[in-house]
Image (cartoon, rainbow, N blue to C red):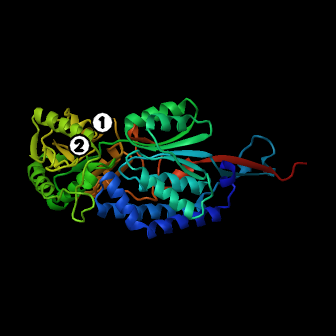
Amino acid sequence: MAETWGATPGHERARLLRAVAERLRADREVMARLIASEVGKPIVDARVEVDRASQVFDFSAEEIRHLTGESFPADAYALPAGNDRRFLFSVRDPMGVVVAISPFNFPLNLLAHKVAPALAAGDPVVAKPTSAAPFTALRLAEHAQAAGLPPGVLNVVLGPGGSVGGALIEHPATRLVTFTGSTEVGKGIAERAGRHAKRLILEMGGLDPFVVLEDAPIGPTAAAAVRGAFTYSGQVCTASKRLLVASGVADAFAREVAKRASELRVGPALDERTQVGPVIDAGAIERLDRLVGDAVGRSARLLTGGGRAGGPGHFYRPTVLDAVPAEAAVAREEPFGPVVPILRFDHDEDAVRLANGTPFGLQASVYTNDLRRAFRLAKQIRAGGVHVNDPTTLRWDALPFGGIKESGLGREGIRYAMLEMTEVKLISVNFDPS
């Protein structure tokens, strides 16, 4: 199937990808309710996820036209002899079978970010979705089949990551593994794939810093921080997980963030009014309780939240911790829930030191009215993306996305993923072999 799909003309692959996108748009409400039911994402946000996923398939179809090689001036090289009689150019060939391992928090869109570019590049896909949301992935596969995708080009395999995912990674037909999830699991995948020289795209954890300088407007900046920290209950790799705030405005900023966080509506995912839904499971509740307890035990001040919300289900109240010491666990570990610490700094250099002081480097934000300082900090902060006066959660589906250090390897974003998923081949032509 790898050879057959790779040989399918690009315009035909594009037509099929657009057909998948159209089917997702027509099925928007059903898909959104499925996402909300499986992983607890508020229905309003789940609809946006379906919109973005359909857009990813459209973007991938368009990028097929731009997946080009290069031409090289052969006569610019003295050796080997005879280069004045040669043409040199490169092409990009499909890599082969891509294994796509996707997480629970964006069960459709993050799977689409792996599947659609691979199919556009001419690679068949074996998808191993999270066990928390298998039906979303299966419905996507049904739409692909109904759109006319040939049998065997997109396959969905369900089961535990350790056994099923491991078998897929080590299968001799697998040429590339693309994964989104925790850094711990990603490192294990890298180790297994590396033993067999498999290509990797890893999008892993983060402790994304949200830096607030003293001239940033308190109200709008606090509103952005709350969006960045608590969207989908903070269960986002790019969530604003550490608010680094200049000491001169920290008291006022902390009060405003706590006030806005306390006003967020916590409730069931299918309720149209819900802003913060449940966390994924009971283990997440236990982790959040541990992080909050550790911070308070180290002198942090609990401004709001700090425990399970009332009633059945895995609901955790939006929690804001102020004056958190840098050695607290919540400032060192990814909470992946609706808990955000505020750390204070005195000088820009301290903000950079705090921002860079973890093994992670996914995204970062800097809020200020002074663009000179903003650009200086953006250059100094070690991250795959830095947003000035926008929250860390910002992502453009068609543009490069990924982290550095222990946050990632390679890049997503349609064209960039397709480059990772293809092989470069150099072709030389001697047009005068005499």
Q: In what element is the residue under mark 2?
A: helix
Q: Is residue 400 something one can see in this rendering?
A: no
- State the residue in front, 198 or 373: 198
In the displayed structure image, the side of residue 55 where residue 10 appears, left or right: right
Tell me: residue 404, above or below residue 118. above
Q: In what element is the residue under mark 1?
A: loop
Query: Which disc is residue 274 wearing?
Result: none
Distance between mark 2 and mark 1 Cα atoms? 13 Å
Residue 421, position as x, y percentages in the image? 57, 48
Tell me: residue 126, above or below residue 12. above
Question: Residue at the spot x=62%, y=36% of the render?
Answer: 172
- State the residue in front, 426 or 155: 155
Query: Which disc is residue 358 wearing?
Result: 1
In the displayed structure image, the side of residue 104 where residue 390 appears, left or right: left
Residue 307, position as x, y percentages in the image? 14, 44
Question: Residue at the spot x=31%, y=61% of the render?
Answer: 45
Question: Residue at the spot x=50%, y=65% of the render?
Answer: 21
Mark 2 and mark 1 lie on one chain; the one further toward the N terminus is 2
Under mark 2, the amino acid is: Ala
Under mark 1, the amino acid is: Thr
Q: Residue furthest front?
A: 312
- State the residue in front, 265 or 249: 265
Query: Which disc is residue 351 wearing?
Result: 2
Q: Quadrant of residue 405?
A: top left
Q: Say if mark 2 contacts mark 1, CB within 8 Å.
A: no
